[in-house]
Image: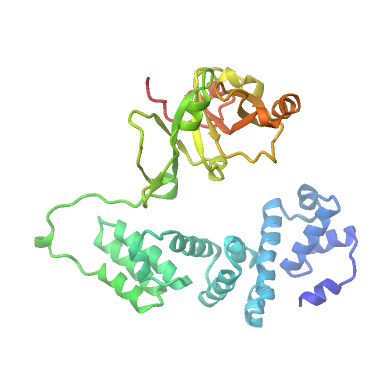
């Protein structure tokens, strides 16, 4: 058990590498040696060269062992731990890394009982997360939050989208029925097998469910231009206020300009974002821009003044009228000169984006966005 593992004598670097090379221990114990070797400065490439375990396998071992430890800590039945002692079990547990401890235990038991492979484990995790995320879908309530019903809900959505082939639709529904555990879920799936009388159908329209990649985007108000931006423009630009399953935007200002950008990682943690337009990206050459052309700069108006990043770009004002863009280091230097009370930090830049162009012309392009609306 865990106490026995902790009580084991120390093993030398050479001995750990030999154990990994020969694979003379259970995979989740090999993971412990990989972690220890890295603490000793032995990197992934060296482990691969000596033991023949590549970086991907090492990652699977280490991450999978964390999930395995969760099962131990939750005192699951010994038969479950024995099942995941087997070679290759790390690939079954790896997908569970994103789940809560409770869901890890539930899914691990389901995977064992239904003999799922690694691809089916990935599907199971996606199905569980989709069920939890789709709070706007009333049909979700027909499927309970457990592995079987979550998979059934996934097949139900697939079947609803299959409008061309009744045979294919029935095949998908049957897969869902194999997984469904609640009576309500079974009834909801079986309803799809009941063909609607043609006399009741008035017409046909294509219906698709958007994937996350197709759906996720950000809408930002445009506050003004980089070279002549005023404090009022920056402060007055509308907050992105979206609601409902489609994130419908209600604009409160007539004639206000907006721009749509993909949901890039820096925007996820943003709180109150707006966009500054750039006539020439070379205005950012002190911050890494190497080529010109138009662009946009996304800034967040919520700034933690106690955590100023010296290399980031900030919008500040000294007179509450004109806006200056300075580095974090320049900001701190100015505070030393004029005092904290005489300088206002208005926003922090998150990302600069350029419009589409030939790859060879992108240069420092961070992202690709739609062309800005004309003046």
**Protein image colouring:** rainbow
Toward which corner of the image does residue 137 lie, by quadrant?
bottom left
Residue 325 vs 187, above or below: the answer is above
Residue 5 vs 311, above or below: the answer is below
Tell me residue 197's x, y (percent): 13, 65
Q: Residue at x 89, y 58 (%)?
A: 14
Q: Pick the residue in front: 310 or 84.
A: 310
Residue 242 vs 295, above or below: the answer is below
Q: Does any portion of residue 251 appear in the rendered image?
A: yes
Can you say which quadrant of the picture contains the N terminus?
A: bottom right
Q: Residue at x 67, y 79 (%)?
A: 75
Tell me residue 354's x, y (percent): 51, 26
Toward which corner of the image does residue 227 lie, by quadrant?
top right
Q: Residue at x 33, y 31 (%)?
A: 254
For this orientation, the residue located farthest to the left is 199
Q: Does any portion of residue 369 appear in the rendered image?
A: no
Toward which corner of the image does residue 145 lie, by quadrant?
bottom left
Residue 283 vs 328, above or below: the answer is above
How many numbered markers are drawn? 0
Can you say which quadrant of the picture contains the C terminus?
A: top left
- 373 left or right, relative to 226: left
- 167 left or right, relative to 371: left
Tell me residue 36's x, y (percent): 82, 59
Q: Pick the residue in front: 112 or 98.
A: 98
Tell me residue 42's x, y (percent): 83, 51
Q: Residue at x 71, y 60 (%)?
A: 62
């Amino acid at each position: 058990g865990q106490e026995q593992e902790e009580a084991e004598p120390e093993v030398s670097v050479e001995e750990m590498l030999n154990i990994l090379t020969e694979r003379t221990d259970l995979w989740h114990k090999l993971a412990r040696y990989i972690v220890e070797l890295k603490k000793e400065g032995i990197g992934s490439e060296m482990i691969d060269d000596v033991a023949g375990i590549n970086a991907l396998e090492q990652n699977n071992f280490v991450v999978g062992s964390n999930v395995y430890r969760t099962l131990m800590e939750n005192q699951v039945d010994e038969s479950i731990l024995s099942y995941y002692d087997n070679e290759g079990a790390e690939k079954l547990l790896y997908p569970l890394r994103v789940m809560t401890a409770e869901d890890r235990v539930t899914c691990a038991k389901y995977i064992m009982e239904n003999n799922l492979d690694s691809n089916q484990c990935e599907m199971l995790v996606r199905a569980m997360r989709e069920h939890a995320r789709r709070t706007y879908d009333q049909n979700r309530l027909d499927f309970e939050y457990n592995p079987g019903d979550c998979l059934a809900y996934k097949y139900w959505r697939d079947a609803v989208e299959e409008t061309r082939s009744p045979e294919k639709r029935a095949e998908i529904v049957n897969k869902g029925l194999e997984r469904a555990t609640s009576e309500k879920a079974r009834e909801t799936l079986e309803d799809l097998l009941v063909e609607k009388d043609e006399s009741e159908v008035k017409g046909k329209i294509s219906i698709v469910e958007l994937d996350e990649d197709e759906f996720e985007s950000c809408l930002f108000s445009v506050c003004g231009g980089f070279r002549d931006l005023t404090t009022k423009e920056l402060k007055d630009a509308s907050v992105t206020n979206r609601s409902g399953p489609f994130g419908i935007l209600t604009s409160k200002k007539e004639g206000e300009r907006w721009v749509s950008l993909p949901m890039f990682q820096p925007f996820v943690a943003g709180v109150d974002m707006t966009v500054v337009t750039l006539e020439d990206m070379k205005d950012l050459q002190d911050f890494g821009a190497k080529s010109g052309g138009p662009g946009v700069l996304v800034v967040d108006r919520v700034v933690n003044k106690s955590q100023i990043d010296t290399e980031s770009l900030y919008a500040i004002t000294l007179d509450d009228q004109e806006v200056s863009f300075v580095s974090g280091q320049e900001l701190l230097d100015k505070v030393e000169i004029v005092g904290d009370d005489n300088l206002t930090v208005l926003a922090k830049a998150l990302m600069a984006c350029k419009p589409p162009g030939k790859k060879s012309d992108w240069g420092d392009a961070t992202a690709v966005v739609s062309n800005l609306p004309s003046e």
